[in-house]
Image (cartoon, rainbow, N blue to C red):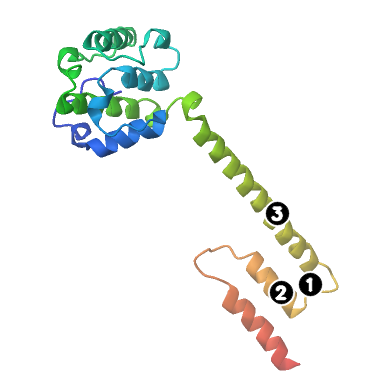
Amino acid sequence: MATNIGMMDSAYFVGRNEILSWINDRLQLNLSRVEEAASGAVQCQMIDMVHPGVVPMHKVNFEARTEYDYIQNYKVLQDVFNKLKINKHVEVNRIVKGRPLDNLEFLQWLKRYCDSVNGGIMNEKLNGVCVTDLKLSVDILEKERDFYFAKLRDIEVLCQAPEIENLPMAVAIKKILYAEDEKDSPLNEAQGIVSSSMNTN
């Protein structure tokens, strides 16, 4: 996990737009500037997403408007860092001033840290909509796959029937069904079998 990362790390070359998109997508927010996250509430939520239940969210002041309130949120965050043994000192006095660069730098570190935990997969609790959509898509694709596989199986059974298995059309269809190499399509060969049988008739 990335807890101590140097200033030349690629994490610090992530732009503010990417950081804002990352925050807005995961927390369903509409931040337009990084300094809007200066209160510390966003950071607490992000850590809670990668370490569910570790952040005492009831102590986080989401309505924080003063530097004093912001500092209380960062105390909660620093306590969580200590509990998780995350070796990161937060420059609270600089961040709570709302300076864009200080806030951007800390959010860049936070994104790198979150991405390093579980490969960047956030807690399903808040990312449930995406997970549900993906599961639904997988279910639909599996049903579609099974539907077409059943059709192919029916065609195979029909082509194996003793009455027609040696007919040119059945031989051509089986040629396609049993082709092993994806690169070389057996279609031309199958068409050749059908064409030559029609020419002999």
Residue 144 vs residue 82: left or right? right
Q: Which mark is residue 165?
A: 1
Q: Which residue is mark 3?
A: 147
Disc 2: which residue: 171
| Dot 1 amino acid type | Glu
Dot 3: element: helix
**Residue visible at 71% across and 87% down in the picture:** 197
Q: Earlier in the sequence, mark 1 or mark 3?
A: 3
Could you say where residue 99 lies in the image, as x and y percent from the top left?
A: 15, 24
Q: Foreground mark, 1 or 3?
A: 3
Residue at x 47% of width, y 26% of height: 126
Badge 2 vs badge 1, beta-carbon distance below 8 Å: yes
**Position in image of residue 10 (x %, y %):** 20, 35
Q: Residue at x 65, y 70 (%)?
A: 175
Dot 2 falls on a residue whose secondary structure is helix
Count how many numbered circles sit on residues in the image. 3
Vertical side of 89 occupied by 122: above or below: below
Which residue is at the front of the view, 100 or 146?
100
State the SS at label 1: loop
